[in-house]
Image (cartoon, grey):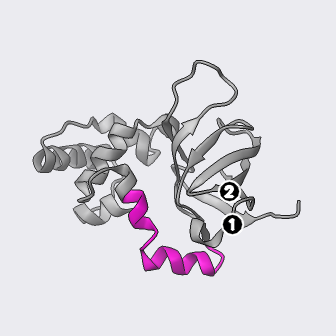
Amino acid sequence: MDIEHEVKRKIRTPYDFEFLAGVIWERLHENISPTTLKRLWGYIDGADTTRRTTLCLLSQFLGFADWEAYVASLATRTDIESAAFEGEGIHINDLQPGDRIEVTWLPNRRCVFRYEGEAHFTVMEAENAKLHVGDSFDTACFLIGKQMFLDNVRNNKEPGTKEGVSYVAGSKNGLNSVKIVNGK
């Protein structure tokens, strides 16, 4: 994970989360609670609706202007693009509008997304996930073994729910599988 690389330390224990919160405060003079970091790392439950402000703060810690700038930078990283061509992940540059992507993650989650173009997707199938058929979101890539970060999630099932939230899937173990399933 980029944050762990930045602080040159694996974030695994309660003390590590306290340490990281302190380093973020020292660098940015912004407060982020160790509990929020624990949720994001999957150390405790609750990362599925991470606030955009939290993602922006962590992106700024890495030297980016905001979350969108960080996600955009993923598109130019050679390690991610190479993995996409080897079947370890899919990047939006590999897709055409109308393509469908199937992703799975623990414990028994499965979704199929239709690519609409310009990093925008619609949920076509959802099993055991907090996403619903008809929801939409933005993302740049789906990588096996990595968390799936969805931004600007628009909920189709529950009128009145907050629009534009971010969603993290596979926060502990990442995605199990990613594949294009056109023709199904």
**Residue 142 spot, x, y in % from top left:** 59, 61
User: Mark 2 sits on what residue?
Assistant: 115
Reply yes or no: does residue 16 show up in magenta.
no
Give the magenta-colored segment's residue range. 70-88
Question: Image check: 162 left or right of 104?
Answer: left
Q: Residue at x 17, y 39 (%)?
A: 30
Nearer to the camera, 85 or 65: 65
Which badge, 1 or 2, is on the more N-terminal residue? 1
Q: Quadrant of the N terminus?
A: bottom left
Tell me which secondary structure the magenta stretch mostly adopts.
Answer: helix
Nearer to the camera, 48 or 18: 48
**Residue 114 spot, x, y in % from top left:** 72, 53
Q: Residue at x 34, y 40 (%)?
A: 54
Reply yes or no: does residue 72 show up in magenta.
yes
Question: Image check: 95 left or right of 145?
Answer: right
Q: How many marks?
A: 2
- Whether residue 171 is situated above or below residue 2 in the rendered picture: above
Q: Are marks 1 and 2 in contact (CB under 8 Å)?
A: yes
Q: Secondary structure at mark 1?
A: loop
Residue projecting furthest to the right: 184
Q: Residue at x 69, y 63 (%)?
A: 177
Nearer to the camera, 18 or 30: 30
Q: Quadrant of residue 15?
A: top left
Q: Mark on residue 96?
A: 1
Question: Image check: 73 left or right of 93?
Answer: left
**Residue 22 spot, x, y in % from top left:** 17, 45
- Whether residue 122 is situated above or below residue 8 in the rendered picture: above
Amino acid type shown at disc 2:
Tyr
